[in-house]
Amino acid sequence: MGDFNQLVPLADSLYARYEAQGNLSDLSLSIVHYRSALTLAKSTPGLSDDARSKLLGNLANVLSIRFQCHGDIADLDHSIECHLAALDFRPPGHPGRANALSNFATALLARYGQLRVQKDIELALKHFKTALSVLPPGDPARPIPLMNYASALFTRFEHCGDVSDLNQVISQYRAVVDACFPDNKSTSYYNLANALLSRFNLDNDLADLDLCIEYSCAALDSLKEGHGDHPLILSGLSTALMRRFERRGDVTDLETAIKHFQSVLELRPPGDRRRYLALNDVADALVMRHRQRADLLDLELAVGHYRAALKLLPLGHKDEGMLLDN
């Protein structure tokens, strides 16, 4: 099995190499060595609670990453067990307790996304809230669990439909934006914009839609060039512009939406698994413009994009019906 003081650095280095090179065998080996180290930790004298907690956290993290790669729910279950065990070594008053609570809640939320067990999301919300309770306003560590708490609430809203959850989501995301957390500025703006669009879809309040567009633009402005979230945020902005065109009839909104959707399509080159969605979005916008101008070219282009999108889908894909209807 080896020596504890050799196993942990070996596991750390294998994980670091996986992050640098992406070789899954390195990730699996790091898990083997972290597990061996955890077994030896029980009989290793003088090992601090912080060292045990860190080891459990590292094992939990690599298990979670392997779950994301392979989808084996057993890895996620074990990750949750490790996060829970790590909490025992970070009791109330420990400076690392908020982080441990947040990590445990994040893993529970991931499992809820797979299995839809209500207990998981309720526990996740409870632990995110507890993490926030030990981080005073202004603490630089507060925005991340605040964002995670809001995301968990939004997930519950999407599956349960409680509007009070959505209102709380918007309130929490506004608090994240107000915290001026530079590393996640674009994500904060986008999350708030997305929640506002969801509320607009429920109550048709144009003030929410205007704010959605404003925050989507702010999210784009705060992105670094070439950032991977650029097409996602640009697509969200375009969708909101189309909704506003439907309500106010300002052709500028529609033209801007088409322009942005076409930019998203360019950012989803052949081979990108989301290209069919970008093709569908451009086609939808072109159909809308055809209804305004009766330009047959728009209709022909839309049909071409719908057909191209259909060709990218495997037989029986859940979105096949949507594209066929279009």
Image (tube, rainbow, N blue to C red):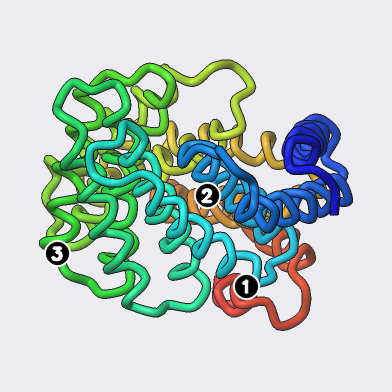
Report helix, strand or loop for mark 2.
helix
The residue labelled by disc 3 is: 163
Q: Is residue 302 visible?
A: yes
Q: What residue occupies the far bottom of the structure in this picture?
A: 316
In the image, is 206 to the left or to the right of 139? left
- Mark 3 burial class by Cα count in 10 Å: few <14, some 14-19, many 20+: some
- Image quadrant where one finds the N terminus: bottom right
Three-letter code, disc 3:
Val
Q: Disc 1 vs disc 2: Cβ atoms closer than 8 Å?
A: no
Q: How many marks?
A: 3
The residue labelled by disc 2 is: 286
Q: CA distance from mark 3 to mark 2?
A: 33 Å
Point out the frontmost of discs 3 and 2.
Answer: 3
Report helix, strand or loop for mark 3.
helix
Name the spot of residue 151 as percent of width and height, x first: 33, 51
In the image, is 73 to the left or to the right of 109? right
Q: Disc 1 vs disc 3: Cβ atoms closer than 8 Å?
A: no
The residue labelled by disc 1 is: 73
Please tell me the numbered disc located at residue 209.
none
